[in-house]
Amino acid sequence: MHLDVLDLRAFYYRTKLGRSTQRSLQQALRRLWPDTRGMTVVGFGFAAPVLRPFLNDARRVLALMPAQQGVMPWPPGGANVSSLVEETRWPIAAGTVDRLIVAHGLETCESPDALLAELWRVLAPGGRVLFIVPNRAGIWARRDVTPFGYGRPYSFGQLEKQLVKSRFVPERHAAALYAPPSHRRFWLQTAQFWERLGRRFDPQFMAGALLVEASKQVYARPPADGAPAAVPGPLDVLGGLARPKPEPVVSRNRDRLRPDAGFVRAS
């Protein structure tokens, strides 16, 4: 079940913990995708807090929000790029998205397989999708003071297995939110210190959020019987062509070569 857009907006934009969370996720994301110039970047769920850095260099940025969650205008003070969509039917042409971010979208959706199929459809061949999900082993998934305390938490292995099932290829993973989900001043002021320290250790047990990047790879369809496709050699590609047949040479002076040329038959 998706959270309400008003609750999400209140956390990320009106609390100090939300703004600290926003900053940590943006930094982790930009380490994975430092350059998106000329690309179409789309966010689904409530990805607006991590999309802002891409407004400066991406060719196009869209923030899609599911109908069960609700939508808000975004970004503030600029031309609106957010849109309300059905969870598994997006108004985007197939194969047109270069980078896709799913935040507060997968763990709260009603049908993960159907959502992943829609992600596959809109993603361009070779494109990348990044999932930001609650860490099953982390503290954030056990407390409901943040949006990461709702929905289905994941481990790296669980999420990657589900992605492979939906034809995605897991590429890289990272983590963020190493400080406890607390509104206390000490934890907020030292959040960046804990982020740097946490990256040196196993994120599976310390981080509040997991980031998994996957790609869409399109391969040639194998034969129906499952046998490996035969690749013809350089000369085999001409094997089906018939050899040219020599045409008879007709001389322009063929009459001169006839035995009776120049003679008149006796009547």
Image (tube, rainbow, N blue to C red):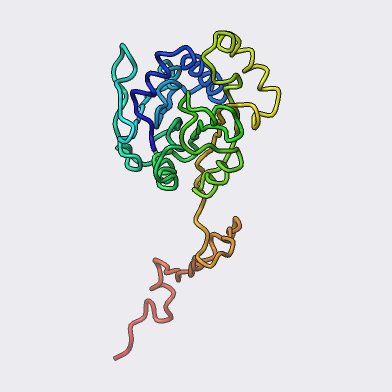
Is residue 136 shown left or right of residue 199?
A: left
What residue is rendered at 44% in x and 13% in y? 15
- Displayed quadrant of residue 97: top left
Is residue 62 shown left or right of residue 29?
A: left
Quadrant where the image shows the C terminus:
bottom left
Horizontal and vertical percent for residue 68?
32, 36
What residue is rendered at 50% in x and 33% in y? 131
48 vs 114: above or below:
above
Residue 57 at least partly seen: yes
Horizontal and vertical percent for residue 221?
49, 56
Nearer to me, 30 or 14: 14
Is residue 9 shown left or right of residue 152?
A: left
Nearer to me, 145 or 177: 145
> Outermost residue, right direction?
201
Horizontal and vertical percent for residue 36?
47, 23
Horizontal and vertical percent for residue 225?
53, 67
Residue 40 at least partly seen: no
Quadrant where the image shows the N terminus:
top left
Nearer to me, 115 or 56: 115
> Outermost residue, bottom direction?
267
What residue is rendered at 44% in x and 47% in y? 113
- Displayed quadrant of residue 154: top right
Is residue 37 shown left or right of residue 83?
A: right
